[in-house]
Amino acid sequence: MARLVVMGGGVSGHTAATFAKKWLGKEHEVVVVTPNSQWNWIPSNIWVGVGEMQKEDVIFPLAPVYEKAGIDYRQAKAVSIHPEGKEDDDTPFITIEYTGQNKKGQTDELTYDYLINATGPKLNFDATPGLGDGNGQMGSHTVSVCTADHAVHANEELQKIFDKAKAGERQKILVGTGHGLCTCQGAAFEYIFNIEHEAKEAGVRDMIDIKWISNESFLGDFGMGGLHMKVGGYVVSSNLFAESLFAERNVPWIIGAHVSKVEEGKVHYELLDGTTGVEEFDFAMLIPPFAGVGLKAFAKDGSDITSKIFAPNGFMKVDANYNAGSYENWKASDWPRTYQNPDYKNIFAVGIAFAPPHLISKPAQSVNGTPINPTPPRTGMPAGIIGKAVAHSVCDLIKNGENAKLHEASMAEMGAACVASAGKGVLDGTAAAMTVYPVVPDFEKYPGTGRDTTYTYGEVGLAGHWIKHILHYMFIYKAKLYPGWTLIPE
């Protein structure tokens, strides 16, 4: 009997574990190690953050789902990887620390035959002074929608702003990224337009100034270098697409910005041209930068090999070209295909946990040398596709031996769909529905745009809102492993 250990139970890890167990059956063991007792459909947190959904609408307990699937569930956080085992035992293992109430604080060693790292990111609030509390948690000056609990708190604070506006006090809202190296601009993009929509619904839009701040060098970059897509039969840039929406909703913007410090009611920022500024606010939601969760790795003799397995940002190295050099040398082929660690062939990394070879967007820094550019997104649909492909690979390795052909899911050959909410409502909701192919542009195959405009398009409207609303229920249904769950695509 072989044992597959999956570290992490988010979109990518949950997908990998559940498919692997289905394909492996009772003959082999699948273990999920995650510090969370609840599964969270993160894309809907923005709706919790404006009061359009409750926390209970976006989470569910993992234990019953894994028990039904026959998956060994450990509510614990992974601490270290020992891919060579110990001096007296070659069996590889990880160390874990339990976070559940029954065993909280206890540690254990968990051996594995195959390991999938799906730990996702650490929300690195402390990368920006004042954005964090100095102890790795969100500070008190701003809010977040990165977790369900964060979103609940964000809505509570937002309603206070609306109450003040109703009382005749003009309010300033600032939404965007809280550091020059942030990713996940999409979540902030959705949140700012849902706030704008809710302000109209509450009758206080004329009393609230709403502003966007982002590390993107242009609106619509989204960490993907922007894109050209078909809209209404014409090929337009995502820059024009985004600027039109911001202008239509009367939301001004600050772009190419690195938030350098957050204080009560104000942020300090630096722009690409080297100038600095201060923006005041009454309410701010700033996405923190992501980092690896801080896993350590040790060799058989106990020596630290963390830098061998992990990139400096804490994400795991896979079959990518990490020596591509400068921007002019970057190619689509630099991106990983199998997500297998090059040094330890029984270890894989999926979703946000794998280290990208480089940015997708063109790198930029201020005249003062401060890096200000979005880092690559690896969430949502790509995370699920990668998790499923790696599960396929591990199952084939277990069943057919170490020479089994690995499944591939390169983001440079992968299409993805994104539905970005711009306001929730049965008849007046809107969303920007976009498809992109491929996620990572391939300028050799698609000169000029880097993408196939036949399959890269976008529309804004009520239909997009209903698609996102339906997808919310579909993906939670899928994650709960209800009948027919495998038929719902990633």
Image (cartoon, grey):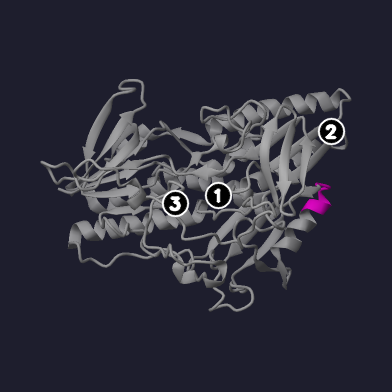
Q: Residue furthest front?
A: 368
Distance from Cα at disc 3 to Cα at disc 2: 39 Å
Q: Earlier in the sequence, mark 1 or mark 3?
A: 3
* Residue at image coords 57%, 77%: 446
For mark 3, does the 10 Å Cα neighbourhood hold few (<14), some (14 to 19), or many (20 or more) residues?
A: many
What residue is shown with label 1? 471
What residue is shown with label 2? 204
Amino acid marked by disc 1: Leu
Can you tell which of label 1 and label 2 is closer to the viewer? 2
**Residue 54: in sight, yes or no?**
no
Residue 429 is inside the magenta segment: no
Badge 1 element = helix
Amino acid marked by disc 3: Gly
- The disc placed on residue 351 is 3
Q: Earlier in the sequence, mark 1 or mark 2?
A: 2
Amino acid marked by disc 2: Val
Residue 260's x, y, as percent?
A: 66, 40
Start-end of magenta stretch: 246-251
Q: Is residue 174 left or right of residue 318?
A: right
User: In the figure, 68 relative to 153: above or below?
Assistant: below
* Residue at image coords 67%, 50%: 215
For mark 1, does the 10 Å Cα neighbourhood hold few (<14), some (14 to 19), or many (20 or more) residues?
A: some
Can you tell which of label 1 and label 3 is closer to the viewer? 3
Distance from Cα at disc 1 to Cα at disc 2: 30 Å
Q: Is residue 400 left or right of residue 322?
A: left
**Residue 274: in sight, yes or no?**
yes
Quadrant of the rendered image containing residue 154 = top right
* Residue at image coords 28%, 57%: 343
For mark 2, does the 10 Å Cα neighbourhood hold few (<14), some (14 to 19), or many (20 or more) residues?
A: many
Residue 85's x, y, as percent?
A: 18, 44
- Toward the viewer: 260 or 9? 260
